[in-house]
Image: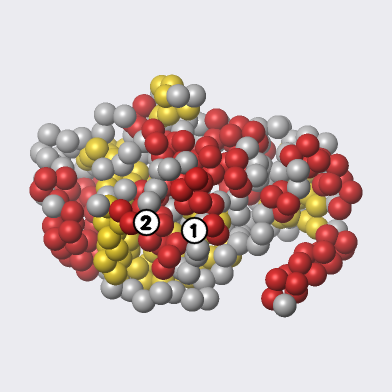
Amino acid sequence: MKRVVILKIDNYDKVVLKKKIKEALVKYFSLNTLFNATDKILLKPNLLMAAKPEDAVVTHPALVEAVADIFKEQTKNIFLADSPGGFLEQKDIDYIYEETGMLDVARRLNIELLYPDKSFMREGFPLCWWASGFAMVNLAKLKTHEVTLLTLAVKNLYGCISGLHKSHLHKAYPQTQDFSQVITKLYSLVKPRLNIVDGILALEGDGPAKAGRPKKLGLVVIGDDALYTDYAIGRLLGLKDEEHPIIAQAIKEGQFSPKDLEIISEVEPITGFKLPSPFILNKIPKRLTLFVKLFFNFKIAINKRKCKMCLACKNICPQQAIEIHEGSLAVDQSCCVMCNCCGEACRFGAVDLEKSFLLKLLSGLSSLLKRA
């Protein structure tokens, strides 16, 4: 049996976090047998971009510190790593570690920060070197995601893929079903020892980056399997299996069965959590994507008012479709494949999806018909 425990924790008080998480680990997961003193423990938070904890885009440093403190009682071999966005340079990763609060945590607890500077191949995936040989503690963030609906424990494993290959996978598999197959394949290759999801301050709306909105849920979810952890969270939010793309794909592949799961929860079912807008590319046959994009006039665009010219979007674009034009950034629509890697990389929320009047009208009619 797999087990998921949902704890009610209202804020990021490190003393409370450590106490409640440790009690749950000892009582429900046999902490002393799950890890031992010789393990090299890798903390793998969600560090999508250089965002502040209050943005609810990254795993909160207080939760990371509380978990690290628990394991410091067992071993000194604790490390922290992620491969955010398409960044490869150590200076970029250092900036993200600093902005997200991970550098301060590492200094206080004497934790070594690792970098995605080497990789190895596993069944077609170039994985960061630290994705093997460590006992991984997967510290995910509860967020929405425009392609996979939610990004939780399983999707957080995407940060084990090296560098810009993440962007190329978004480009190659832009639609939800295809991309979900990529994620379930990755799940079969990378198995964290433990999964803890930060849902104290979650992200709703058009996540997973700055276009989403912080939403206080006051919960932390612990599970011994990433997929079953995500299933329990989906159920808590009122999702049916077929509405939760990664779960639906895993069931189709025979990777998951709800009867194998025990859920222990201190939290009542949640209503009113805003999911992202329907992903527009899912309604279009792949071979017609470019034609329909031109016909209905929807496109990725840079909001000049919000843009700070940091060039993160330009550097991460797998198509090199973003260019500097007359002192500002612009998207070459003939190259853009709508993978939205630029939107995930932008920490200022300056990447928009512009829709024509006709497309807005059709979207509105679709919503009305759904409610009817």
Q: Disc 1 marks which residue?
A: 241
Left or right, 154 with reference to 274: left
Please tell me how crowded label 2 is: few (under 14), some (14-19), or many (20+) other residues with Cα within 10 Å: few
**Which residue appears at 39% of the width and 33% of the height?**
189
* Dot 1 amino acid type: Asp
* Residue 42 position (above or below residue 14): above
Q: Which mark is residue 146?
A: none
> Which type of secondary structure does the marked residue at label 2 adopt?
helix
Q: Residue at x 61, y 32 (%)?
A: 168
Residue 99 visible, this orientation: no
Check disc 1 and report its element: helix, strand or loop: helix
Of residues 76 and 335, the one nearer the viewer is: 335
Say what amino acid the circle numbered 2 marks.
Answer: Pro
Residue 139 image offset from top left, x and y in percent: 34, 50
Locate the C terminus and report the quarter of the image it occupies: bottom right
> Where's residue 348, x and y in %?
61, 55
At a point 55% along the width and 59% down the height, the residue shown is 243
Instruction: Please give the residue where the numbered disc 2 appears in the rendered image.
Output: 258
